[in-house]
Amino acid sequence: MSDRKPDNLYQRRPGGPWWILYYVNGKRVQRSLGTTSVREAKRLRDEILGVRAGGDRIRAKFGIGAAPTEGEPVPTLREVADRWMLTKRIAKRAPSTLSHYEDSLRCWIRPHLGGRRLGDISRDDVRAFIDMLRKAPGKEGRKMSDDQVAFVFGRLRSIYLFARREGLWTGLDPTDLEKQERPAPGKGRDTILTLDEAQRFLAELRGRWYYMVSVSLYAGLSVAEVNGLAWADVDLDAAMLTVRRNYLDGAVKTDARADTIPMHRDLVKLLTAWKAQADEDVEWLFPCRTGKPKKKVTPVDYDVLRDAAERAGIKKRVTWHTLRHSYGTALYESNPDPKALQSLMRHSDIRITLSRYVHPDRAKLAEKVNALPSITGATRAKLRLV
């Protein structure tokens, strides 16, 4: 870090707070010191520029990265992001996960922050980036959801943590914001459908969409897994369903997701009726016009759900994953066996099942507490308590 001006403090208006002007890797940086005292401003300036001890502590206060080690230029965020993405491919992450990672980098992180060096990005820059994401139009002009904003921010944070682990960066992490400042995914009652809502929702669907949504609600399959179902995967006599693929040729997300699970009796009836409508030589449950399953999810897949929810008077944001969450919660409420729930949800880690896919109805918690056996009656009789 170099100081090109002997006295790089200034005020934008008389009596206002002091500002500092300095350069990082040849780039001009201006920042408010938040004080009107010239003595305090000079002290902060000296510590920020490393003239006095305690510079890192003061830099942390202002979200300023440490100066690069001489002879070792700090890489740009794009360079580190590319290396981080390579490690994810080597680790053989699921194709759908890698696609989401790459979308976050290509659409948001590389264009807006990629050309800057790690030390040039401050906490204020990250805050501005988050604000930009919240206002940016998503697909078809709609704003990005809380889930999407949180996902992109999570990838940015992962890149900085990766840079520290790999020894590419030893300065301060600008993504280390206060908890309330970090974008959080959407949670709460809007993540599931109640029984009444599910019934009204299904009543607004027609044709293949009715049967596809039924499979997702009754078996907890994602839209990719539903699109990849073949009739060979469905044993209607044994009431068993086997998940083998995503879409046409895609591998399932994890090894645990490839499994055989029992089908609800109502789902068996529905698929029996759907098979009766299909041609005998059709291999797939829900083929497109070419006779093969869809290769990827399209906006139409989500528009159908949104329109059906509106017609049913459901104010919640309904997605295909809402259906999977609804399935998991219904299973838990009918039989709260964690291991059975993990097996039916086909999760490799039970923590994912319990932390993300179980949304107990808080209105029913009092009933569960009052269902506990009474112990005070026996105690009073024994101790003769009044």
Image: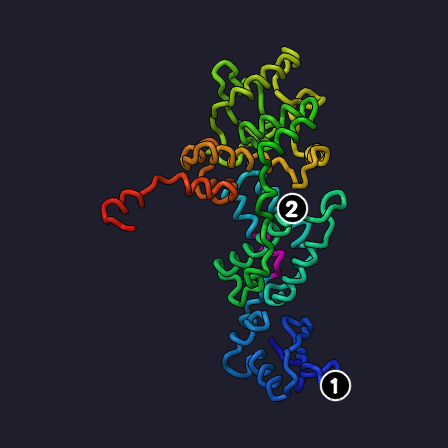
Instruction: Identify the residue shown where x is 68% and y is 41%.
Output: 315
Q: Residue at x 59, y 28 (%)?
A: 226
Asked whether the viewer can see residue 255, the reply is no
Tell me: residue 373, above or below residue 274: below
Q: Residue 71's mark?
A: none
The residue at which mark 1 appears reads as 14
Q: Amino acid at mark 2?
A: Asp
Between 294 and 301, the one nearer to me in the picture:
301
The image shows residue 80 at horizontal and vertical percentages of: 58, 56
In the figure, is residue 159 to the left or right of 302? left
Q: Position of residue 55 (x, y in %)?
A: 53, 78
At horizontal 63% and vertical 12% (from top left) the residue drawn is: 276
Query: Given the current orientation, which residue lies at the most extreme top position?
Result: 280
Q: Which residue is mark 2?
A: 103
Secondary structure character of the magenta stretch overall: helix
The one nearer the camera, 197 or 226, is 197
Question: Circle 1: is it few (<14), some (14-19), or many (20+) Cα within 10 Å?
Answer: few
Q: Is residue 79 magenta?
A: yes
What's the magenta region? 76-83
Residue drawn at 54 percent across, 54 percent down: 158
Say which of 210 and 350 sits in front. 210
The amino acid at mark 1 is: Pro
Label 1 to label 2, Cα distance in Å? 47 Å
